[in-house]
């Protein structure tokens, strides 16, 4: 049974490292180093070995399978998730549920289907697909800030690209206020379905937390029942030998063990996903915009960020009637983009001049409506 625990722990740790290891917070940590090893160094070494022994055949097949699972629309990951949860719930209801008091049984019945209900809505809801018919509404809902987003046309969809949108190469369309493409729901997270994805993440937190607490409750009850009938008493409940004795004597089943340890190891992952989503919402940006703000942060640190201001030193567009500021990043011999004709007209008509940005206070995230406003927008709209 301990091999199963080791397997679950390894998969959970690898998942956490591959998902979050490249985050700036882990840049100089053991997690960041592990990510570089797993995502860069190890694949490179294995590829060289494969070239030597099999002319790259193994790598090509593995890459094709990996691309299909994560970079093509398919239900494989959703089915794997559903199968794991159904198996866990089968073990829970067959081994643990009968030993619980009535109130906890009722609580279990209510919580068990929540993750599947949230998964259904997250998978089937329109994420906010932009079409020629709704593109103007998308632009109205998400105006250009001229810092992260400028007016442009999607080279694939051949329609105007609203601010906060992105073309998804997997879904083959532009998504309004896109966060990321999620293989767990086989869809993009966008303006219309982010609320369902948040509920899906929180439902998994509740499911794993409940599984952990109730399986621990059942094991502790079995432990107390057994120690009252034996002399000398059992070792500590945390001693691996204790589980073997309880299993051997029939006080618990293997399902108790699997549900407890699986819940214990998967709960941190569910919490990490939920915390990341809730944090970004509170701060007023999406996962897609987070990377853009990181680029702005790097430009600010290097002293390469400039913006146009009026005679009072106020960035144009940050006033009561403004929709954004005109900012540019110097790349060594040119700016990161050319000014649009509309921006040229703004600069001339408002007598704007360019100046260096030296502080975050000079920048404005116009999409941040405050913590309450941000959550209200996600859960209650307006939607596309």
Image (cartoon, rainbow, N blue to C red):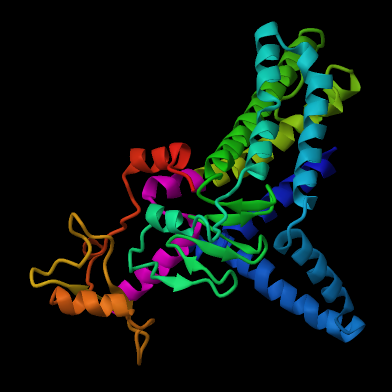
Asked if residue 317 lies left or right of residue 234, the reply is left
The residue under the point 77% across, 16% down is 97
Quick check: is 41 in the magenta stretch?
no
Q: Give the tally of numbered discs.
A: 0
In this picture, is 85 found above or below 43?
A: above
Asked if residue 340 lies left or right of residue 66, the reply is left
Relative image position of residue 268 (x, y in whole percent): 60, 42
State the image quarter where residue 274 is shown: top right
In this picture, is 241 found above or below 184?
A: above
Q: Which residues are magenta?
A: 276-304
Quick check: is 295 in the magenta stretch?
yes
Asked if residue 339 lies left or right of residue 295, the reply is left
User: In the image shown, does 335 or 48 lie closer to the viewer?
Assistant: 335
Relative image position of residue 337 (x, y in whole percent): 38, 81
User: In the image shown, does 378 or 86 lie closer to the viewer?
Assistant: 378
User: In the image shown, does 141 or 226 lie closer to the viewer?
Assistant: 141
In this picture, is 336 found above or below 149?
A: below
Instruction: Indicate the quadrant containing the N terminus: top left, top right, bottom left or bottom right.
Output: top right
Relative image position of residue 247 (x, y in whole percent): 86, 24
The residue under the point 39% across, 67% down is 149
Relative image position of residue 326 (x, y in whole percent): 27, 72
Q: Is residue 365 visible?
A: yes
Q: Residue lying farthest bottom?
A: 333
Q: Main secondary structure of the magenta part?
A: helix
């Amino acid at each position: 049974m301990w091999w199963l625990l080791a397997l679950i722990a390894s998969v959970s740790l690898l998942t956490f490292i591959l998902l979050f290891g490249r985050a700036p917070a882990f840049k100089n940590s053991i997690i960041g180093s592990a990510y570089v090893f797993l995502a860069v160094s190890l694949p490179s070494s294995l590829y060289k070995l494969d070239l030597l022994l099999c002319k790259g055949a193994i790598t090509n097949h593995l890459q094709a399978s990996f691309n299909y699972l994560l970079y093509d629309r398919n239900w494989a990951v959703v089915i794997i998730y559903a199968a794991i949860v159904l198996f866990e719930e089968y073990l829970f209801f067959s081994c643990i549920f009968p030993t619980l008091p009535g109130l906890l049984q009722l609580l279990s019945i209510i919580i068990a289907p929540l993750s599947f209900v949230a998964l259904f809505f997250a998978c089937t809801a329109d994420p906010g697909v932009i079409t020629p018919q709704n593109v103007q509404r998308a632009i109205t809902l998400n105006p250009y800030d001229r810092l992260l987003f400028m007016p442009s046309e999607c080279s694939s969809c051949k329609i105007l690209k609203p601010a906060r949108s992105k073309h998804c190469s997997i879904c083959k369309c532009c998504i309004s206020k896109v966060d990321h493409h999620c293989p767990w729901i086989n869809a993009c997270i966008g303006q219309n379905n982010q609320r369902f994805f948040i509920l899906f993440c929180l439902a998994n937190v509740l499911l794993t937390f409940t599984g952990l607490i109730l399986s621990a409750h059942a094991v502790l009850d079995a432990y107390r029942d057994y120690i009252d009938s034996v002399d000398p008493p059992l070792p500590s409940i945390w001693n691996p030998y204790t589980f073997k004795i309880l299993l051997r004597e029939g006080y618990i089943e293997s399902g108790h063990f699997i549900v407890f340890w699986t819940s214990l190891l998967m709960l941190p992952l569910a919490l990490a996903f939920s915390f990341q989503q809730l944090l970004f919402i509170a701060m007023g940006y999406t996962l897609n915009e987070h990377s853009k703000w990181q680029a702005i942060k790097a430009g600010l640190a290097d002293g390469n960020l400039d913006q146009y201001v009026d005679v009072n030193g106020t960035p144009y567009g940050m006033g009561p009637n403004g929709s954004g500021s005109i900012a540019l990043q110097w790349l060594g011999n040119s700016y990161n983009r050319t000014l649009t004709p509309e921006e040229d007209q703004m600069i001339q008509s408002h007598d704007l001049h360019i100046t260096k940005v030296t502080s975050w206070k000079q920048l404005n995230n116009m999409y941040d409506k405050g913590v309450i406003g941000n959550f209200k927008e996600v859960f209650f709209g307006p939607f596309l």
